[in-house]
Image: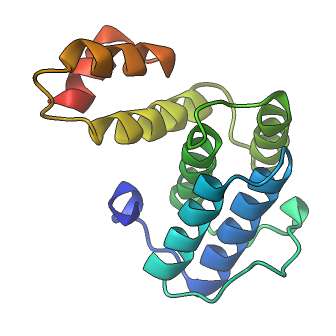
Amino acid sequence: MRELFSDVDINETEAAWIAQGMRALAACDGLAAAELALVEQFEHELGIGSTATDDFDPAASPLRGDGQKGVFVRTLVLLAHVDGRVSSRELEFMDDVCSRLGVSGDDRAALEVDAKSFLLSSLSGVEHYRAQAEAVGRKLGLTDEQIAAALS
């Protein structure tokens, strides 16, 4: 997961707030084991302690710039898709947080494509099941060009 944002400097305070937001998103429609595993992986990769008992305040963002906001939005999109479906509660949560951060329109759409392409890229190099991998990309809402780029 770290490679998704290796070009952005995330400090410990930002990492903890992002992890808290990820936990809040996961909890908004019932915490799934895969969601929890992704949050814990994020915490581990960034070397922060567990945020399991922390509260998330979307109005108290410590994020310093667009790069850090982008990391947060991409991690939310990944987390929302990890259990195979995005619930209406998860969409509402992401809409609210993105609005509070001032991430909307084309910027948000591009961040969502980045996250979905990253998710699909885990299937890159697949030959025998290429059609199924492409179907996953379409289910994620990616264009044929985005799918081809992710799978190459």
Instruction: Determine which quarter of the picture holds residue 7.
Output: bottom left
- Give coordinates of residue 43: x percent, y percent: 56, 77
Horizontally, residue 96 falls left or right of residue 14, namely right
- Say if 32 sits above or below 114 in the image: below
Horizontally, is 51 left or right of 75 in the view? right
Q: Nearer the viewer, residue 61 or 20?
A: 20
Can you say whether 1 is above or below 95 in the image? below
Q: Position of residue 116 (x, y in %)?
A: 45, 34
- Residue 139 relative to residue 121: left or right: right
Q: Residue at x 45, y 73 (%)?
A: 9
> Total of numbered circles in the picture?
0
Closest to the observer, 39 or 16? 39
- Name the residue rendered at 40%, 60% in the picture: 1
Q: What residue is at 67 percent from the left and 69 percent from the top? A: 19
Quadrant in the rendering for residue 120: top left
Residue 131 point in image, percent of width and height: 24, 12
Q: In which quarter of the view is residue 142 placed?
A: top left
Front residue of 68 and 82: 82
> Could you say which is closer to the camera, residue 127 or residue 10?
127
Q: Which quadrant does the C terminus fall into? A: top left
Q: Colour scheme in the image?
A: rainbow
Height in image: 22 above or below 116? below
- The residue that appears at 61% across and 34% down in the rendered structure is 108
